[in-house]
């Protein structure tokens, strides 16, 4: 009697969720270009030392190390498994001298103590996991303490009227489709559950690859909390518009009035101390 043939694994079963996340969500080089250029414009000196909070695999921190021989980086995250993946796949690809300039720390950003850095980065809306004002203010206070005298905290934020909806958005890549799933939204507390799924050409799906329980913070709330935490100034950097396409042009500049878009992403830049003009 012939043995039953073993069913081949699907693309979803073979997929690496961290690799897929980095390919579809992160763009560290572009992000770091904005951070470095903005830091130089604000302080008059080049950016050297960064701390990537909620760093996950440390992808951005490692990218910073690769961009300059005088660059140093610290990554902080609570998840040991994700940090281990980053050490294997990102730190493992660095040279010995590059690895000497980076440290990935398993710790809580609310309590970790690190050497002073020029900039703290909390990107991909990671700080939205703090759903109470006192916790978010406490995080901003801790981030401010981690900065050198003229240091800067960089955040991103998202919003727009589609952010309040329970919707799915699909983005196609060469080998997979990225699915952003706003699974639930509570308008009273602005609590939301968001998930990331990945779909593949063989019709398999990596469901709930990532899940987030966030508060959808508004820009006025975030700025108020940054100032309450002691930052001297908190500036919104809004994306410009391409005149031909009507879409975002990838260029961010200080703004006090934004567009009432269905969906937007912006940066918040908080200066520890006021710089005299």
Image: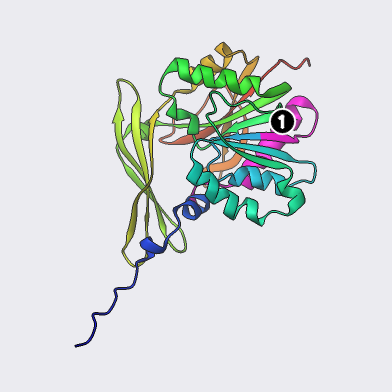
Place of residue 18 in the rendered image (x, y in percent of width and height, measured from the top left): 48, 51
Magenta-drawn segment: 24-50
Q: Residue furthest left?
A: 1
Q: Quadrant of residue 146?
A: top right
Residue 240 or residue 215, whichever sits in front: 215
Which residue does the image show at 45% across and 63% down from the upper left?
175
Q: Quadrant of residue 206?
A: bottom left
- Residue 6 left/right relative to 232: left
Place of residue 135 in the rendered image (x, y in percent of width and height, measured from the top left): 47, 19
- Residue located beneath label 1 in the image: 39
Residue 163 or residue 215, whichever sits in front: 215
Q: How is the image coloured?
A: rainbow
Secondary structure mostly taken by the magenta-highlighted segment of the chain: helix
Place of residue 176 in the rendered image (x, y in percent of width and height, measured from the top left): 42, 60
Quarter of the image with the C terminus in it: top right
- Residue 275 left/right relative to 107: right
Place of residue 247 in the rendered image (x, y in percent of width and height, measured from the top left): 51, 43
> Is residue 166 among what the camera can see?
yes
Check the image and report above or below for 194 versus 3.
above
What is the secondary structure assignment of the residue under circle 1?
helix
- Residue 171 left/right relative to 65: left
């Amino acid at each position: 009697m012939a043995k039953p043939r073993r069913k081949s694994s699907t693309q979803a079963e073979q997929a690496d969720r961290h690799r897929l996340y980095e390919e579809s969500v992160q763009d560290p080089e572009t992000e770091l270009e904005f951070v470095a250029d903005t830091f130089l414009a604000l302080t008059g000196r080049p950016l050297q030392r960064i701390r990537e909070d909620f760093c996950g695999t440390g992808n951005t921190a490692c990218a910073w190390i690769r961009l300059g021989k005088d660059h140093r980086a610290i990554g902080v995250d609570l998840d040991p498994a994700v940090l281990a993946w980053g050490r294997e796949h990102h730190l493992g690809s660095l040279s010995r001298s590059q690895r000497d300039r980076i440290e990935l720390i398993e710790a809580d950003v609310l309590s970790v103590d690190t050497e002073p850095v020029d900039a703290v980065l909390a990107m991909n809306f990671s700080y939205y996991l703090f759903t109470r004002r006192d916790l978010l203010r406490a995080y901003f206070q801790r981030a401010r303490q981690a900065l050198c005298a003229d240091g800067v905290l960089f955040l991103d934020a998202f919003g727009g009227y589609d952010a309040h909806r329970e919707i799915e958005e699909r983005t196609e890549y060469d080998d997979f489709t990225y699915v952003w799933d706003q699974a639930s939204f509570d308008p009273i507390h602005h609590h939301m559950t968001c998930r990331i799924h990945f779909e593949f050409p063989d019709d398999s799906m990596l469901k709930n690859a990532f899940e987030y329980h966030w508060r959808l913070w508004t820009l006025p709330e975030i700025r108020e909390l940054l100032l309450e935490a002691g930052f001297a100034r908190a500036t919104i950097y809004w994306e410009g518009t391409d005149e031909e396409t009507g879409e975002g042009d990838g260029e961010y500049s200080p703004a006090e009035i934004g567009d009432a878009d269905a969906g937007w992403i912006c940066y918040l830049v908080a200066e520890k101390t006021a710089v005299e003009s």
